[in-house]
Image: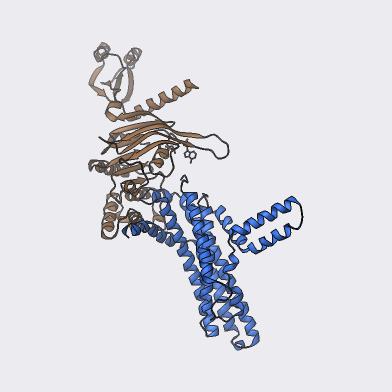
């Protein structure tokens, strides 16, 4: 027990300082403010501008639009925050050489990475919680029912971010600036959302006999097999069309959590493997 | 006496990624740092000092050879790391923090907590003379203030070993003296210090042993007293006539420097002091004093590096 707390002390210290530093980053705060503005603007202002419409059909359309904007804003800004943070925490310290002083302390490289990674997760979680919280209040005010579906959605979205974060983090462990891993993170997010399409590519490519088509098809199916399918984590359709206080249908929550954790863990282990012998 | 830091045939090759030339930064280095000493690790730019130090701290990895610190080969174990304080070259610290917060952060990484930690923070801030700026953001620190905080974080856990890469670079003369005194004080309290530096005058004042590195090879290594053997004699004279000096020069006695009517003459190796004095007398030069003159560290450095350079030229 003692050994365990000893092991996690260093990482936890690093995580807290990473979080403190991260919440001061201008890009990050900028994204957060923007997203909150979008959510606030679309939900509250619309209601104030046109209170008479509450209840009729047109307002239903309106509500759907607002939900669409907010869900999209949370997904978009959330993933941007995730990618920027995951891509930069380690390369920044390598670049400004703060890492020399940290790694020379009684902190193993694994503990250092763990601390940084947990710090990133704290940042991601807190931002996600703020965005979801505002959206939650907005919907509650509008519809007078607890929009619990949002909480389920936020949880699943977090596991989606965890996957993106872990692999962006892994790329960042090989880089000495945050540019490459940021691009890598965007690529991971995009392809992760396109896995259905990739499967489709393989089916179509299989219909001709040319070797190039064959190659593209195989590559696509390989990618589809190894890449996580991030679409699984989206409750958007249900949020737009269903009741706000329904439990999520059409998804197996425990399976998705395991899926997210497994991918997250492999991403993190990959980063350790890449970072283990990295020369500073 | 068992060594605190010991390297055996330690080598480092920086491999070039794109088919360029590999850099052999360190070649089979055997280095021994003994307990309770200040070891001065010297060498021209690019000779491999920082490379060695980074390997000692596990920031980069040896291409071959071994490192043993405090009798342990697992230099990344926390048992070893807990006993090392490190000041990196041109160090940088999270600048969104206040001076004391930085120390709190590093102190926690050493496993210090609570009242213990706070007491250490107060102590080291006092030691490096930063009490007045302890609650200011690092962003607003000057170069010298950063360096002082850097030294404070190296000291925070009261480690047995201090590894300092150019600790006085960029400091004003008073700060240099202060830091020098701190380092000497630490040594007197039984700490072991490995210091890389270009400030030879300073280093000479406090260190016990030196190693001079050139292109990854130790060219001179040992006790300060035994290395600076090249003692010669200097004769101080007053108001020497130029003609007399010219005659002395012919015999090999060179004027070293001259100020306020007195001059310092250097007796060359191999010449007897009596002969030199005889010559002075024959020229009616007025004698002020005769004194042995110890070689300075700077002279040793220039001589050693010069010889290594010459040897390399011959080899080419
Ligand atoms: N990351 C690296 N990649 C390639 N070569 C490197 C790297 N770091 C150092 N070198 C090379 O290794 C040699 C030794 O460098 P090092 O930094 O150890 O010198 P130093 O003695 O600390 O010099 P200085 O007094 O200028 O600080 C130099 O030739 C340097 O160019
Ligand atoms: Mg150096």
The answer to whether residue B251 shows anywhere in this view is: yes
Q: In the rendered image of this protein, which colour is used for chain A? A: blue
In the rendered image, the residue lying farthest to the top is B282
Vertical arrangement, residue A74 with respect to residue A118, above or below:
below
Q: Please say which color scheme the image uses.
A: by chain
Q: Quadrant of residue B90?
A: top left
Q: Quadrant of residue B165?
A: top left
Q: Is residue A236 left or right of residue B276?
A: right
Q: Position of residue A199 (x, y in %)?
A: 67, 61
Q: Position of residue A165 (x, y in %)?
A: 52, 60
Vertical arrangement, residue B138 with respect to residue B223, above or below:
below
The answer to whether residue B238 shows anywhere in this view is: no
Q: Is residue A234 left or right of residue B108?
A: right
Q: In the rendered image of this protein, which colour is used for chain B? A: brown
Q: Which residue lies at the image location 55% right of the left edge and 64% below the top edge?
A: A79
Q: Position of residue A264 (x, y in %)?
A: 51, 60
Q: Nearer the viewer, residue B291 or A164?
A: A164
């Amino acid at each position: 027990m003692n050994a365990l707390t000893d092991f996690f002390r260093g990482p936890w210290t690093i995580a807290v300082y990473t979080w403190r530093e991260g919440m001061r980053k201008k890009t990050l705060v900028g994204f957060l403010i923007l997203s909150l503005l979008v959510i606030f603007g679309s939900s509250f202002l619309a209601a104030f501008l046109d209170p008479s419409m509450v209840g009729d059909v047109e307002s239903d359309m309106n509500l759907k639009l607002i939900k669409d904007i907010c869900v999209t804003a949370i997904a978009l800004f959330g993933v941007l925050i995730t990618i920027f943070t995951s891509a930069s925490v380690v390369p920044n310290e390598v670049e400004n050489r703060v890492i020399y002083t940290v790694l020379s302390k009684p902190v193993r490289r694994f503990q250092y990475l763990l601390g940084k990674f947990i710090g990133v997760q704290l940042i991601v979680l807190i931002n996600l919680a703020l965005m979801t919280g505002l959206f939650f209040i907005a919907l509650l005010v509008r519809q007078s029912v607890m929009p619990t579906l949002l909480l389920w959605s936020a949880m699943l979205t977090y596991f989606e971010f965890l996957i993106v974060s872990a692999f962006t983090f892994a790329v960042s462990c090989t880089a000495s600036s945050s540019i490459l891993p940021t691009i890598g993170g965007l690529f991971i997010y995009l392809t992760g959302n396109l896995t259905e399409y990739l499967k489709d590519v393989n089916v179509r490519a299989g219909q001709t006999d040319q070797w190039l088509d064959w190659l593209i098809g195989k590559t696509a199916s390989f990618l589809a097999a190894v890449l996580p399918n991030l679409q699984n984590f989206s409750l958007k359709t249900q949020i737009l069309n269903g009741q706000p206080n329904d439990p999520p249908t059409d998804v197996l929550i425990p399976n998705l959590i395991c899926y997210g954790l497994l991918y997250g863990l492999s991403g993190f282990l990959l980063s350790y493997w890449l970072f283990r012998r990295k020369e500073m | 006496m068992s060594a605190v830091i010991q390297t055996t045939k330690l080598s480092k090759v920086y491999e070039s990624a794109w088919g360029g030339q590999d850099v052999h930064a360190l070649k089979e280095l055997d280095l021994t740092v003994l307990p309770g000493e200040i070891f001065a690790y010297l060498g021209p730019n690019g000779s491999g000092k920082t490379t060695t130090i980074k390997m000692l701290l596990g920031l980069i990895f040896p291409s071959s050879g071994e490192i043993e610190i405090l009798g342990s080969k697992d230099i990344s174990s926390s048992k070893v790391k807990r006993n090392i304080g490190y000041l990196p070259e041109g160090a940088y610290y999270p600048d969104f923090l206040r001076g004391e917060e930085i120390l709190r952060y590093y102190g926690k990484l050493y496993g210090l907590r609570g009242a213990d930690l706070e007491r250490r923070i107060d102590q080291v801030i006092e030691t490096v003379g930063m009490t007045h700026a302890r609650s200011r953001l690092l962003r607003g620190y000057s170069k010298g203030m950063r360096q002082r905080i850097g030294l404070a974080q190296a000291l925070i856990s009261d480690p047995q070993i201090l590894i300092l890469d150019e600790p006085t670079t960029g400091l004003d003369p008073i700060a240099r003296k202060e830091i020098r005194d701190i380092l000497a004080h630490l040594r007197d309290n039984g700490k072991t210090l490995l210091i890389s530096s270009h400030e030879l005058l300073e280093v000479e004042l406090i260190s016990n042993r030196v190693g001079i590195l050139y292109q990854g090879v130790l060219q001179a290594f040992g006790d300060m007293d035994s290395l600076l053997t090249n003692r010669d004699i200097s004769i101080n004279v007053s108001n020497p006539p130029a003609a007399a000096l010219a005659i002395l020069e012919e015999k090999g006695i060179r004027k070293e420097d001259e100020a306020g009517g007195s001059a310092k003459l250097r007796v060359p190796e191999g010449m007897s002091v009596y002969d030199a004095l005889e010559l002075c007398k024959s020229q009616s030069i007025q004698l002020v004093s005769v004194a042995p003159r110890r070689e300075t560290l700077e002279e040793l450095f220039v001589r050693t590096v010069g010889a290594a350079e010459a040897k390399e030229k011959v080899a080419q």
